[in-house]
Image (cartoon, helix red, strand yellow):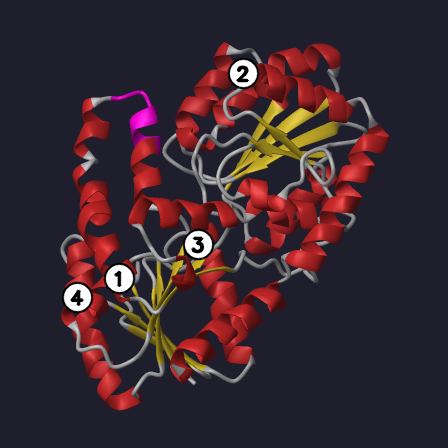
Amino acid sequence: MKICMFAKYLPVHITGGMEIHIQELVNGLIKRGYKVTLITAPHPQGIEKEKKENLTIHYVKNKPKYTREKFYRESARLFERLNKEESFDIVHSQSTLACGYARYCKKTAPLILTSHGTMLNEIKALLRRNFSIKSFLTLPTPLKIYLLDEPIIYKKTEKIIAVSNELKEDIERQYKVPKGKLVVIPNGIDIDRFKPMEVDDLKKKYNLTDEKVILSIGRIDKQKGFHLLLKIFPDILKEYNNIKLFIVGTGPYLHDLKEMTIKLNILGKVIFTGRVSDGDLLKYYNLADIFAFSTLRMEGLPLVVPEAMACEKPVIASRIGGITSVIDNNKDGILIETGNLKELKGKVLEVLGDEELARKLGKNARKKVVERFGLDRMINDTVKVYEEVIEK
């Protein structure tokens, strides 16, 4: 099977949940003997093409400024050239990035799409922020995607993969997509990699002896809710002084968070690690006593939640988006009302004060991820979708 996949970014551009998902999916497809061609954004170092075994990556020429519309046109031209050589069996769009194929190319292969979130949900999240001229000026692009791009590609796809039940329902409701066109395949976790392990070296690095650690990981954007953890942390310190908060990641809101730690007088108790390598990320999960994810953003299925669960950590997360697909409240994690500081603080204190509860949540979390969110299952289910649409 020859697969052409369109993706906005890869880990070489940015390390986020969608980029990791694409990397894991592609690696799994290649291991199963399939040939994958990736079409993606310009390479940061100007590389146009990379080839390794059954994977070829083409970085579009999209200068001087990278925009979706330019990508659609350039990627469509590139696809038509490549398809003459390869005769692809399937086209797989990550989000709406194959819109150029749907809009400009003669349809030669079935099109499927993996939705990691809807643009209408993104617009709602944007409008919930502190509204400003800057946020207003960003609206035209998401509005165009919502009004023009998504309806086109949703109509022309044979199947749409939603990464959570909640997202599937949003797509049905917001875009009037027939139920039979949708299938739920949650993002997969490498359970052989993300697992409990000792991290004495990391403890030594940060001079941790018997301190408790609260951990949060993600792109540092205000909608990710890291500032909520900072706001409750002074009260946590009143109950448990021997504790530290680790925030892993980079992003536009990082400077504001650092300023907050100064104003809240918690500077020495909060560790901003910046970006960490994939290998070290696993260690940080295992450093934690609690993984907290207080996002305000409607997300499809943020990978950090099942990754932390796979490492047998008690997770406290917002009751929003696809997170509710992964956590059964009070069984294998704890869900809190989105943005509720009082509940967030209360649940953090509850888990810190009850080692048996923390242990139970962690054990159940690992068990669920192994049973339902394994990487092999995600890849196999995706291949089944490929085979189904090709047979039609």
Q: Nearer the viewer, residue 271 or 371?
A: 371
Earlier-in-chain disc, 1 versus 4? 4
Q: Which residue is mark 4?
A: 103
| x then y, percent, for residue 372 | 66, 57
- Distance from label 3 to label 2 (Cα)? 29 Å
Q: In what quadrant of the picture does the N terminus appear?
A: bottom left
The residue stretch that appears in magenta: 125-131
Secondary structure at badge 1 equals helix
Q: How many residues crowd around disc 3 within 10 Å: few (fewer than 14), some, or many (20 or more)? A: many
Task: Identify the residue at horizontal 68%, vertical 23% (top origin).
Answer: 347
Q: Amino acid at mark 4?
A: Arg
Q: Position of residue 261 (x, y in %)?
A: 52, 18
Q: Residue at x 27, y 65 (%)?
A: 98
Nearest to viewer (mark 2 / mark 1): 1
Q: Label 2 to label 4, Cα distance in Å? A: 47 Å
Q: Which residue is mark 3?
A: 18
Q: Residues within 10 Å of mark 4 (few under 14, many from 20)?
A: some
Q: Quadrant of residue 356?
A: top right
Q: Are marks 2 and 4 in contact (CB under 8 Å)?
A: no
Q: Specify whether 318 is left or right of 38.
A: right
